[in-house]
Structure formats: structure tokens, C-alpha cells
Image: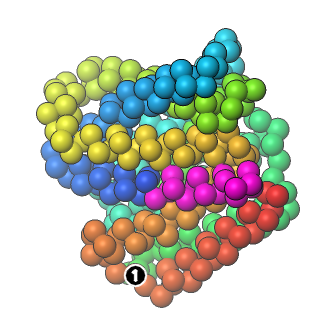
Amino acid sequence: MSAGLLWAALVLVASALQTMRFVLQKVLAGSGLSTGGATFSRFLFGAPIASAAAIALLAGTGETLPDFSPRFWGFVLAGGAGQVFATFLTVKLFQMRNFAVGVAFTKTETLQVAVFSALILGEAVSTLGWLGIVIGFAGVLLMSRPPEGGRLLGGSAWLGVLAGAGFAVAAIGYRGATVELEPLPFVLRAMVALAAATCSQTLGMGLYLRVFERGELTRVVRAWRRTIWVGVTGVGGSAGWFCAFALQNAAYVRAFGQVEMVFTLIASVLFFNERLHRREGFGIALVVGSLIVLVLGSA
């Protein structure tokens, strides 16, 4: 498979796994865990898996790690903090809106990451790429408008926009971190950066819960039979995202990741008995069309 198709395939797998994680986190958010606890479960069990995978790859390939530069750690910590912030707000959104709409508002990220990518990493998006981003974003807006005809830009929408900004910072940070590890093979760069990010997130979130939500760490661990699957699906999805970031401009990766919204709508129908409306069908068609344009624009 060519690199132009490989990164897209990785995004499809990552988006499917991330949708599974969001489903699990929505359930956890209503099962006695706080928003912080449900968010922390994403990292607690993911960090050991990511670290073990990175160590196994290093041993299997015989590669040695380069020195971790301050720039690498800057990207990792910024990306990790952005992801924690965005995940926290996304779980909060699940408690305010229906499942599909909550995730949809975070998709303003696709526009933000394209701008940040050019400004911070110097990776511009082609005209065709921008067309794909705009088409996909229009499709997401169609899918996210409240069925009852309520306001699109309510209070929860602004939480979604902030979550999108956090995810955009995470995308730029993770893309930058994988680039800093060149010339290692892309899979190794991805897993080493992922291990560094998830370990730092686990430490940071653990300290936060210890100080501000006393007792929540114990509740997360006691619920390990449920929370462990959030970690497993989360780290699996993140591995796909990191590999895609190692291969392609973050703007294309995250824009293509709008396919996650299609998976989210399917999950809403299957798991939460939420109806699929005609306008959402049009939105799905636009998103699918944008994926084709994005692949052509990234060639």
C-alpha cells in the first residue's frame, strides 16, 4: 500500500476505535465516575500498553533512540495537555447534549489545525486540500444541527469549539513530536512519541485527581473491569493517529478524521437509540465526498 493510502487507512481504523472509546466514556460518565475520572481512565491503562509496544519495537528492530530534544518534549507536553483538556470537555459535553451532537461540535478542530499547522510547523494545505476540509466541515454542520431546530451556537457549542482547539493543539504537538524523531521508521517514531505522551498524561491527570478530586483515583481503579477497555480502545486509536501523523501533514490527517462523525452517528443509533435524520444523511454524503478530495489533495 502506498504512503498516500496507508495514512488514510490508519485514520479509518483510528476513527473507529476512537468512536468505541467515546461510547465507553459516555457510559462511564454516567456510572459514578466524575468527568475527570472518566477522562483519566483513557490514559491510566493506555500508558503501559503504549510503553510496552515501544520497547518491543525498539528491541525487535535493533534501533536506538535519538536524544530527546527540548523541542520534542515541548511538542509532547503541549499535545498531551491539549488532548487532556479536549477529552475533559468532550466528556462534559456528553452530559449536556446527545452523543452525536456533542462530538460534532469538536470538529471545528479541522479548520483550526490547518491554520496552526501552517503557522507552527510550516506545513501548508493545498487548494484542493482546503476544499476537502470545507466540504467535510459543511457535512459536519449538517449532522450537528439540533433536530428540534434549536440554536446551533448554544453554550455547549462553545465548549465544543474549545474542545476542538484542544484537539488541534494535540494534533500539531503529536505531528511535531514524530517529525523530531526522524530518521527512525514511522511506526517506531509513532509509538515512542505515543508512549511519551500517554505517560506524561497519566502522571499529570493522576496528580490533578489526587489534589482536586480526592478518592476519584480509587474509584477509577476499582472500576477497572470497565475502565480498562477505555484505555485499550484509546491507545489502539491513538496508535493509528500517531502513525498517520508520522506519515502526513496533521491538517490532512485530522480533516480525514471527520469520518469519525459518520461512525459516531452509527454508534448513536445502535447504542443510544438516537434517530438518524435526513439532513444527517446529506451530511454523511458530504463528509464521504470530502475524504476523496482530501486524498487527492494530499497526493
Q: Is residue 122 magenta?
A: no
Report the residue marked by disc 1.
276
Q: Quadrant of residue 226?
A: top left
How far across and down, in percent of the image, does residue 154 sit?
Answer: 45, 63
Q: Residue at x 73, y 63 (%)?
A: 294
Examine the rendering and report whether any part of residue 153 can be seen: no
Residue lying farthest to the top in this orientation = 67
Q: Quadrant of residue 156?
A: bottom left
Q: Residue at x 69, y 19 (%)?
A: 71
Q: Is residue 46 above or below residue 67?
A: below
Which secondary structure type mostly characterizes the magenta part of the structure? helix
Label 1 element class = loop
Residue lying farthest to the right in this orientation = 127
Q: Magenta residues, as a range?
A: 1-16
Near mark 1 (Cα within 10 A), the count class, few <14, some 14-19 or many ≥20, is some
How far across and down, in percent of the image, does residue 171 sit?
Answer: 61, 41
Q: Residue at x 25, y 49 (%)?
A: 29
